[in-house]
Image (cartoon, rainbow, N blue to C red):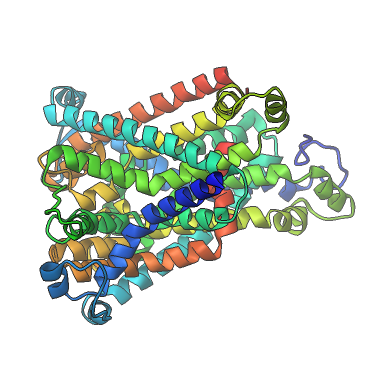
């Protein structure tokens, strides 16, 4: 009995600590600035969506959202395609000089280095290529970062698939590539899903490179736009809260929908 | 495991030109993109770190002078010190809380599923938004802490204006955001442990604490070590949340190394100096990772 009570107590406590800050942001977004600054209420007494309407009618949130969706979708698709192929090569082939192993190791090292380390030269590169403030500049950057992650994840998924299946297919007349496409790829589908989900979340949320590489609503992503907005409206608390809710909503919904795969992707690196 | 790509002697494979080239074709797209967008910039950053810039233009090759300047820069040392404290404190708290929570959730009971679902939210929310969440908590006049304090009859609570409290404030943010990841990793690790030692311990009449210290902890050590190293490297590069929440202030109290480097590059246009700073940061992280890998090899799977 006491054990059950304690368990319930801890559960409620943890839920409270996680959810209370989020509740506060949502509650603030539904209040008027007068209610926030003069009454400091604990919940919105006259909830209204005025802040949200304001956000989408005046501030360029529609553009930010479009930019984010395009950049995320394209770079995740590209990196997943390129990364899966490379991962398969590393998992299955033994090349001269152990090239495949060296490539795998280099990608892992690149993954360990914090992205901020190459922020300046990537900025200079995009400046040279005239890709500042464009979708393409962000897509290239994110694709490269995602590839390092994708190869590493997918390699271990391909290694889990028994080679015999592909060998059998080749005995039956499949080419090397057809065996990959018909046998290995479908079997690796859960791994591809986990990798894709993780990449989508990281890419959608990325801020540092978006901050350095974009400057106007033409290419600014959601996090970048949100940060700019709250820099401009320092004490417009209700707009800030509404921007936070809108900024977080797409990715939180996405994460909760694909929860099961997500946990696998998050924990895999350490437990394997 | 047999390698079925080359030289496996399958009749169809031998001499088939495209099949011989296949692995290289598979590797090419990834290698090209990574070379162009990551490796070349890395090398370019090294070059930039040996140059002097004025208003974004190169004005001379100066060898190691940027690095020597770093050495004697009190603000750089402060940023390193703040970062080290931030990483150590955050990761330590997250590990202890994450482990406690994972042990707590190991026994299935009603509520665990809900708990696991809810705990996903902090780590997937956009870090910029996490910063907004905490600004709305810390704001002295209208924040959640002040609202709660006033509802209980207290006064305003000010966090971000005070150096010590602001630092604790960013640690609290990191703990809120990343304890769930520690929890998930350690829970997955705990679930892979064999049950026999625990049953034996129970038969022997060992208490829960003894069983934890004698069996759980040693067996969990490899997972624990990897989780701590990964989290520490990640925390070392923290930027978004602190940039939006405090911009490094008040004064330099929360100015992490990434923020200092960013300001040097983009606010003060000291491109070469900032490049040298980031090369140094990269080396520090790699050295840390290497040391960790060697340590892990020694610890080994227990």
Q: Residue furthest top?
A: B298
Q: Position of residue B173 (x, y in %)?
A: 30, 47
Q: Position of residue B91 (x, y in %)?
A: 38, 35
In front of the other: B109 or B184:
B109
Above or below, A18 against B73 in this view is: below
Q: Nearer the viewer, residue A220 or B242?
A: B242
The answer to which image quadrant residue A47 occupies is bottom left
Left or right, B7 with respect to B258, comes to: right
The answer, for residue A80, to whether it is visible in the render is: no
- Residue A204 rendering spot, x and y as whole percentages: 40, 60
Relative to A36, does residue A262 appear above or below in the rendering? above
Q: Residue at x 50, y 24 (%)?
A: B293
> Is residue A67 in view?
yes
Name the one closer to the observer, B133 or B24: B133
Q: Quadrant of residue A67?
A: bottom left
Task: Name the quadrant of the N terminus of chain B.
Answer: top right
- What residue sits 21% from the left and 37% below the top? B274
Left or right of A31? Residue A99 is right
Q: Observer-nearest residue: A56 or B41?
A: A56
Instruction: Indicate left or right for A81 with B20 as reference.
Output: left
Residue occupying image coordinates x 41% and y 64%: A71
**Which image quadrant: the C terminus of chain B?**
top right
Q: Residue at x 20, y 70 (%)?
A: A238
Label count reads 0
On the image, the x and y values in percent for residue A75 come to 46, 60
Task: Report whether B120 appears left or right of A184.
Answer: left
């Amino acid at each position: 009995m006491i054990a059950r009570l304690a368990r319930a107590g801890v559960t409620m406590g943890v839920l409270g600590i996680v959810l209370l800050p989020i509740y506060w942001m949502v509650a603030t977004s539904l209040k008027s600035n007068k209610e926030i600054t003069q009454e400091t209420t604990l919940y919105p007494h006259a909830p209204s969506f005025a802040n949200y309407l304001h956000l989408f009618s005046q501030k360029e949130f529609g553009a930010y959202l479009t930019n984010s969706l395009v950049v995320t979708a394209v770079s995740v698709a590209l990196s997943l395609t390129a990364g899966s192929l490379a991962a398969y090569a590393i998992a299955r082939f033994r090349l001269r000089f152990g090239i495949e192993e060296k490539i795998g190791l280099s990608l892992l090292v690149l993954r360990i280095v914090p992205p901020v380390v190459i922020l300046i030269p990537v900025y200079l590169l995009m400046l040279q290529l005239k890709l500042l403030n464009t979708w393409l500049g962000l897509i290239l950057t994110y694709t490269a970062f995602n590839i390092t992650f994708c190869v590493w994840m997918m390699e271990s998924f391909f290694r889990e698939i028994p080679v015999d299946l592909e060998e059998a297919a080749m005995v039956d007349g499949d080419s090397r590539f057809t065996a990959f496409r018909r046998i290995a790829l479908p079997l690796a589908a859960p791994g591809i899903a986990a990798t894709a989900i993780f990449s989508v979340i990281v890419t959608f949320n990325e801020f540092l490179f978006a901050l350095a590489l974009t400057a106007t609503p033409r290419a600014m992503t959601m996090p970048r736009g949100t940060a700019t907005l709250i820099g401009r409206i320092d004490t417009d608390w209700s707009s800030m809260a509404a921007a936070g809710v809108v900024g977080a909503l797409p990715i939180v919904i996405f994460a909760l929908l694909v929860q099961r795969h997500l946990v696998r992707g998050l924990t895999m690196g350490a437990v394997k | 495991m047999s390698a079925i790509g080359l030289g496996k002697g399958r009749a169809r494979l031998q001499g088939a030109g495209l099949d011989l080239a296949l692995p290289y074709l598979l590797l090419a797209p990834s290698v090209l993109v990574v070379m162009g967008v990551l490796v070349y910039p890395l090398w370019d950053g090294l070059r930039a770190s040996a140059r002097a810039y004025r208003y974004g233009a190169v004005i001379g090759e100066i060898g190691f002078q940027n690095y020597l300047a770093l050495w004697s820069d009190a603000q750089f040392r402060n940023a390193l010190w703040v970062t080290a404290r931030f990483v150590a404190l955050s990761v330590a708290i997250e590990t202890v809380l994450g482990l406690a929570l994972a042990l707590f959730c190991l026994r299935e009971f009603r509520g665990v599923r809900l708990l696991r679902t809810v705990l996903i939210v902090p780590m997937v929310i956009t870090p910029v938004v996490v910063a907004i969440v905490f600004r709305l908590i810390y704001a002295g006049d209208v924040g959640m802490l002040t609202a709660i304090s006033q509802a209980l009859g207290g006064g305003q609570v000010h966090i971000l204006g005070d150096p010590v409290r602001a630092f604790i404030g960013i640690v609290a943010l990191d703990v809120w955001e990343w304890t769930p990841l520690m929890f998930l990793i350690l829970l997955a690790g705990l679930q892979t442990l064999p049950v026999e030692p625990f049953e034996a311990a129970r038969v022997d009449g060992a208490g829960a604490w003894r069983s934890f210290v004698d069996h759980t902890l040693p067996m969990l050590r490899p997972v624990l070590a990897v989780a701590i190293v990964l989290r520490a490297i990640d925390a070392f590069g923290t930027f978004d949340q602190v940039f939006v929440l405090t911009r490094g202030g008040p004064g330099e109290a929360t100015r992490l190394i990434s923020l200092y480097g960013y300001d040097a590059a983009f606010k003060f246009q000291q491109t070469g100096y900032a490049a040298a700073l980031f090369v140094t940061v990269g080396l520090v992280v790699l050295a840390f990772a290497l040391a960790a890998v060697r340590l892990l090899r020694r610890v080994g799977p227990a």
